[in-house]
Image (cartoon, rainbow, N blue to C red):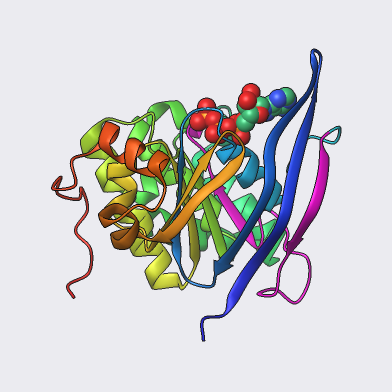
């Protein structure tokens, strides 16, 4: 039987806003299986990022959380940055603009893996090569603004996996990139999670992008989980009218995936 990484039960998240409270997740039940590539799709404001932040324990302090997030896949409460890696939409938000790329990755490896300065730098170089940054030696000394948007996102991925997390959460990680670069980054994420045996949660409003490589899709709408199922089943025969509408508005079902899946 598949091993569970996380188990969310009746997860309800309410933000305290100036105009009152805002229900961002409403009674979410979801099991996340070790090693799966899970796409979370939904329209803007449906609660996707809130789910990502809740999993990482990164919700703002004034947020009210009910229900539970269990982590049967971890011996102890997983730590963001160590057990859970994050890639956000804007690499600029996760990378410090005034610190060289190499040092940013090196610091993570030193902090979380306790590596010596030299070993951490070797790891940073290897990670830059792993995410296919051309000329990793030069890139180590580069500042984020000296790289292209796609390269910055590759660096952000290298930083996210530097501490060897078991779970990688990519929140709209490709939304700011053009279509070709998007497909390259998705292919890279897909390859990395397979090779490293990580679990991937890929948050996106782009069903076509998700359908190319996700094992399973979760559909959120207005803070609620509408439907979840294996990608092919959900795309081929959505059970909920909302999912069907979402699919119809984004892709024809004969749209070829942007990233080829594994041969059957
Ligand atoms: N810190 C916050 N304080 C108050 N309300 C918030 C906060 N963060 C998010 N919200 C609200 O909670 C709801 C869910 O937001 P969330 O960012 O999780 O949605 P999303 O599906 O990720 O949207 P998007 O695709 O636009 O990023 C939205 O209505 C949003 O306005």
x, y percentage for residue 193? Answer: 42, 65
Up-down: is 66 above or below 174? below
In this rendering, position of residue 21 left or right of residue 234: right
x, y percentage for residue 255? Answer: 15, 45
Up-down: is 123 above or below 25? below
x, y percentage for residue 211? Answer: 30, 52
Q: Residue at x 72, y 63 (%)?
A: 78
x, y percentage for residue 261? Answer: 23, 63
User: Which of the image's four quarters has the C terminus?
Assistant: bottom left
In this rendering, position of residue 132 left or right of residue 180: right
Q: Nearer the viewer, residue 12 or 100?
A: 12
In this rendering, position of residue 59 left or right of residue 210: right
71 within the magenta span: yes
Q: Nearer the viewer, residue 182 or 115?
A: 182
Q: Residue at x 77, y 30 (%)?
A: 15
Q: Residue at x 58, y 27 (%)?
A: 98
Location of residue 45 (image quadrant): top right
Q: Nearer the viewer, residue 41 or 228?
A: 228
Query: Quick check: can you spot residue 150?
Result: yes
Query: Quick check: can you spot residue 132?
Result: no
Task: Name the residue furthest bottom.
Answer: 1
Up-down: is 45 above or below 124? above
How many marks the image carries: the answer is: 0
Where is ligand 1, by quadrant? top right
In this rendering, position of residue 131 left or right of residue 11: left
Q: Residue at x 22, y 53 (%)?
A: 259
Up-down: is 24 above or below 123? above
Range of the magenta residues?
A: 63-91
73 within the magenta span: yes
């Amino acid at each position: 039987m598949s091993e569970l990484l996380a188990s969310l039960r009746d997860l309800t998240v309410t933000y305290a806003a100036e105009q009152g409270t805002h229900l961002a997740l409403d009674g979410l039940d979801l099991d996340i299986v070790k090693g799966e590539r899970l796409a979370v799709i939904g329209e803007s404001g449906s609660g996707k990022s809130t789910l990502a932040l809740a999993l990482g324990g990164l919700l703002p302090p004034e947020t009210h959380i009910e229900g539970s997030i269990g982590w049967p896949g971890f011996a102890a409460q997983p730590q963001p940055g160590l057990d859970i890696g994050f890639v956000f939409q804007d690499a600029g938000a996760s990378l410090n603009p005034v610190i060289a790329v190499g040092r940013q990755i090196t610091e993570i490896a030193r902090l979380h893996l306790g590596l010596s300065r030299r070993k951490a730098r070797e790891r940073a170089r290897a990670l830059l090569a792993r995410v296919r940054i051309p000329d990793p030696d030069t890139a180590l000394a580069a500042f984020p603004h000296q790289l292209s948007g796609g390269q910055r996102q590759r660096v952000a991925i290298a930083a996210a996996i530097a501490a060897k997390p078991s779970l990688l959460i990519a929140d709209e990680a490709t939304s700011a990139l053009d279509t070709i670069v998007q497909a390259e980054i998705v292919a890279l994420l897909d390859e990395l999670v397979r090779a490293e045996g990580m679990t991937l949660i890929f948050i996106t409003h782009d069903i076509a992008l998700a359908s190319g490589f996700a094992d399973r899709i979760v559909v959120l709408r207005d803070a609620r989980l509408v439907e979840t199922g294996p990608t092919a089943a959900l795309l081929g025969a959505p059970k909920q009218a909302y999912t069907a509408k979402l699919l119809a508005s984004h892709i024809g079902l004969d749209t070829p995936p942007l990233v080829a899946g594994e041969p059957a």
